Image: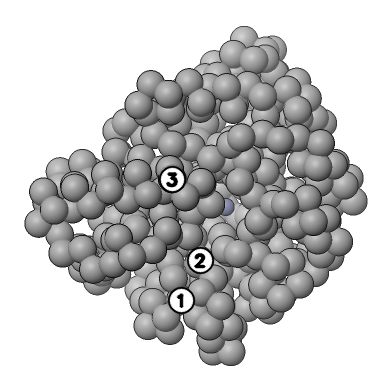
């Protein structure tokens, strides 16, 4: 691991809390909760993480959600991510979380949100990273998950929840199908973001912006297939939360050299770098930075701009983002990184 990159304080806006569970933790949870896994050993479970398609990925995802059965499972999941923050100096994160799955498979959506919130609040009070939550509608169960999730948000005033999001597969689920629920969430005072332009094309990105009112797009890389969509993102300053290794593993791009990160930047689209589901893709945030620098040709100054975008386009309270801006500024100065616009925004 690159020593300088690993110790620089980082932000990431696109990581799924349930997608941070390692095979080892999942194995333990299944054992304690007597959930039958379709594998006979930890080694086999590790091999299952080496999936072949997006559908296979979603299958493993749901299996994992079904292993989260008790309060302590949720605590363990949060603690796992906090340890990851410690290892990679992650200071600000927006975590996608899907209460609907826990309503259907586990301890209840509202309860799961309460436990996760309490754990992250304790960590923040103790000087740990600042975590905020994006509550996702999983697209694959649209008719039930949409109304459930929006009602939950309308009834809650959770201090960590900063947005409604849209996760799950894109194929067969045009983003416009979710417009009514997104309108309700906006009416209730929530900013909204959406996955688009990953397994679906540039038209999904356009729909997410124009019909859902998305402030940011998770992935969005296939916007590069349509110059008009790239222009739309740039004009409206819609940030794409890119996860390079995830794109490679799920075959959104055939190889690293074909990744459109540079094309997004050249078109003036704001971008952040994230891990998406780190153990699923065998990656971590320092690794994503290394990949962008060593294989996609980003300079350290460019990487740092992407890092600051996590605060510029992040949805935490302004005072919190300003405090973190200052913290990052001090680290950049100490590391000799030229800071272009750190204090101008937020
Ligand atoms: Zn994602």
Res 118 → quadrant:
top right
Residue at 37% across / 49% down in the picture? 322
Judging by the rendered image, the residue that carries numbered circle 3 is 319
Numbered tag placed on residue 133 in the rendering = none
The image quarter in which residue 267 lies: bottom left
* N-terminal label among 3 and 1: 1
Marks 2 and 1, Cα distance to the nearest angstrom?
A: 7 Å
Q: Position of residue 134 (x, y in %)?
A: 62, 45
User: Which residue is most to the top?
Assistant: 32
In the depicted view, which residue is nearer to us: 228 or 19? 228
Numbered disc in front, either 3 or 2: 3
The residue that label 2 is drawn on is 240
| Residue visible at 29% across and 61% down in the picture | 342
Q: Which residue is mark 1?
A: 269
Q: Residue at x 61, y 55 (%)?
A: 53
Q: Are marks 2 and 1 in contact (CB under 8 Å)?
A: yes
Counting from the top left corner in percent of width and height, residue 110 is at 75, 28
x, y percentage for residue 64? Answer: 64, 31
Please name whichever residue, 230 or 130, is drawn nearer the observer in this view of the structure. 130
Quadrant showing the N terminus: top left
Q: How would you rate the neighbour count of disc 3 (Cα within 10 Å): few for under 14, some for 14-19, many for 20 or more? A: few
Q: Say whether residue 198 is visible.
A: no
**Quarter-of-image position of residue 59:** top right
Asked whether residue 146 appears in the rendered view, the answer is yes
Whether pointer 3 and pointer 1 mark residues with C-beta atoms closer than 8 Å, the reply is no
Q: Give the mark nearest the N terminus, 2 or 1.
A: 2
103 to the left or right of 18 = right
55 w.r.t. 199: above or below: above
Query: Tag 2, which secondary structure?
Result: strand
| Disc 1 secondary structure class | loop
Tell me: 193 left or right of 126.
Answer: right
């Amino acid at each position: 691991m690159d020593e300088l990159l690993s110790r620089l304080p980082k932000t990431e806006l696109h990581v799924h809390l349930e997608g941070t569970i390692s095979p080892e933790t999942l194995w333990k949870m299944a054992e304690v909760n007597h959930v039958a896994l379709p594998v006979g050993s930890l080694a086999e479970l590790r091999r299952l993480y080496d999936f072949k398609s997006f559908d296979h990925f979603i299958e493993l995802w749901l299996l994992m959600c079904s292993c989260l059965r008790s309060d302590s499972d949720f605590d363990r999941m949060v603690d796992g991510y906090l340890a990851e923050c410690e290892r990679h100096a992650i200071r600000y994160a927006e975590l996608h979380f899907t209460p609907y799955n826990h309503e259907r498979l586990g301890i209840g959506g509202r309860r799961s949100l309460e436990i996760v919130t309490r754990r992250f609040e304790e960590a923040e009070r103790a000087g740990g990273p600042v975590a905020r939550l994006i509550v996702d509608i999983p697209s694959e169960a649209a008719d039930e998950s949409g109304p459930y999730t929006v009602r939950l948000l309308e009834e809650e005033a959770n201090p960590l929840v900063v947005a409604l999001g849209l996760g799950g597969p894109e194929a067969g689920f045009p983003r416009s199908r979710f417009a009514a629920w997104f309108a309700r969430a906006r009416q209730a005072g929530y900013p909204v973001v959406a996955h688009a332009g990953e397994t679906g094309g540039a038209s999904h990105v356009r729909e997410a912006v124009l019909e859902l009112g998305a402030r940011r797009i998770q992935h969005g890389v296939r916007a590069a297939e349509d110059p008009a969509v790239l222009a739309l993102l740039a004009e409206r300053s819609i940030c794409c939360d890119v996860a390079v290794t995830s794109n490679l593993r799920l075959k959104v791009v055939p190889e690293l050299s074909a990744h459109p990160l540079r094309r997004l930047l050249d078109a003036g689209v704001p971008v952040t770098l994230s891990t998406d589901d780190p153990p699923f893709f065998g990656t971590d945030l320092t690794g994503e930075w290394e990949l962008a620098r060593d294989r996609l040709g980003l300079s350290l100054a460019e990487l740092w701009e992407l890092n600051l975008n996590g605060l510029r386009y992040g949805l935490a309270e302004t005072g919190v983002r300003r405090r973190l801006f200052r913290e990052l500024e001090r680290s950049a100065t100490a590391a000799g990184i030229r800071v272009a616009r750190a204090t101008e925004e937020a």
